[in-house]
Amino acid sequence: MVLFPASPVLIPDMSTTHTSLETAFRLANEQYSSAGVDVHGALKTLATIPISLHCWQGDDVGGFENSGNAIGGGLAVTGRFPGKARTADELRADIQFALTLIPGNHRLNLHASYAETAGRRVERNELVPAHFQTWIDWAREQELGLDFNPTYFAHEKAADGWTLAHLDRGIRQFWIEHGIACRRIAAAMGKAQKSPCVNNVWIPDGMKDIPIDRKGPRETLAESLDSIFAESLPATQILDAVECKLFGLGSESYVVGSHEFYLGYAISRQKVLCLDAGHFHPTESIADKISSVLAWVPRLLLHVSRGVRWDSDHVVILTDELQSIAQELVRGNFLDRVHVGLDFFDASINRIAAWVIGTRCMLKALLMALLEPISMLRQFERDGDYTARLSMLEEIKTLPFGAVWDWYCLTSGVPTGPAWIDQVKQYERTVQSRRNASGAAIPARSAAAAGSA
Ligand code: RNT
Ligand code: ZN
């Protein structure tokens, strides 16, 4: 059995000397400066933007409850790439390693199902901050901010796909209590880290086929949400977010928490709205929504993801859509009102590489946006010179962005260019190949043999 696909070709050594990177950066800087771009200012701003890495990429949204419940909720993780984190310690080690390959200071987004309960079953409505103390202590050591999410899936009380809008009052109450418990945990995290923890509510509730009653479940959801948010907690500790979705696997015809539902809810309750890039019609982009919804809601949370056909959670890459999202954040001066989080899960490639690819691409998109000659572009637009605006937008696409990005990586102490891939392969050989699905360590010799098979 091939445990780790052997790499048929070695990653080419594209490393460049410090001097040549510096020369390339100097020339790039000159070129950008002549277009009126402050490159050093752009890099300074980029360094202040935290990306919230989603813990669930590291273990296929598994969590540590070991209850045997299927993930459910319309979420599906495909792929069998070996070496996934099996314990919280392994997950923390993997995240720590991933962060050494990503420039800047970032955050970690945890789900309630990643509680550490010392092998005891703790009901989700009985979770307390102590179940996350190890995460909190570790995050403090790593200087990582934490964000949080109640988990409304992978549970027997969510097995029929209904939670906060459930017809059964008892089940609904259980999930309301889970929501309340999670807000307290998020606030404790926010207090410990002295920076608000974004607590994002996403529920799967919906129907596979045509519903007769679209109204009732939405009224119920609004009531449940109001009960969850009834307790007032300081905004210095917690920011409440709600996430919409158009359709999911098994909820193709109707999702209770649709965009219009949550947009209205977030405006009327002044909550943070979460826009997931994969939660709209397949050709619809969230970029154009940013300035629209920020006219009415105080803050936004982004779940940056990549929809491919029916899947909303492919690894983020540097697409036009990603670039337009970043451009909107920068052009609209929205960076201080928007929390950027990632949301994808791919088990068909090395899970750490998935984090690194997605996060580096998000940062590249932001840097590209920060390097736009924005005053010049604005002036063209104000003058009604749309010819110059379009021409310039195309010309700047071939400015030497790569030299600035490499310089940022170099000065942030992380690998430049594709050098990080070798480091992931090395970690695969020395750490991940020793893990197997049953939890037992694979003897080093057979792991190595399998790796080269
Ligand atoms: C599901 C939502 C949600 C989840 C995570 C695991 O469609 O995007 O954000 O991906 O909570
Ligand atoms: Zn999401």
Image (cartoon, rainbow, N blue to C red):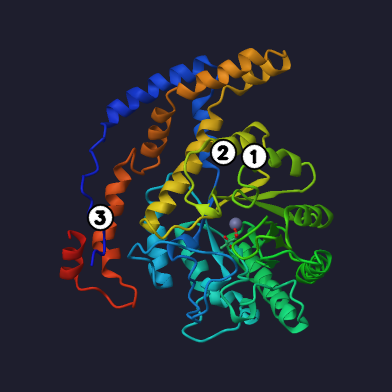
**Disc 1 CB within 8 Å of nearest ligand 2 atom:** no
The residue identified by callout 2 is: 321
Label 1 and label 3: CA atoms lie apart by 37 Å
* Secondary structure type for disc 3: helix
Q: Residues within 10 Å of mark 1 (few under 14, many from 20)?
A: some
Q: Earlier in the sequence, mark 3 or mark 2?
A: 2
* Secondary structure type for disc 1: helix
Label 2 and label 1: CA atoms lie apart by 7 Å
The three-letter code of the residue at mark 1 reads Ala
The residue identified by callout 1 is: 287
Residue 164 versus residue 28 in the image, above or below: below
Q: Earlier in the sequence, mark 2 or mark 1?
A: 1
In this rendering, the label closer to the viewer, 3 or 2: 2
Judge whether residue 288 can be spotted in this image. yes
For the point 28% across and 59% down, which residue is it? Answer: 428
The three-letter code of the residue at mark 2 reads Glu
Q: Residues within 10 Å of mark 3 (few under 14, many from 20)?
A: few
Q: Nearer the viewer, residue 156 or 397?
A: 156
In this rendering, the label closer to the viewer, 1 or 3: 1
Q: Is residue 326 left or right of residue 244?
A: left
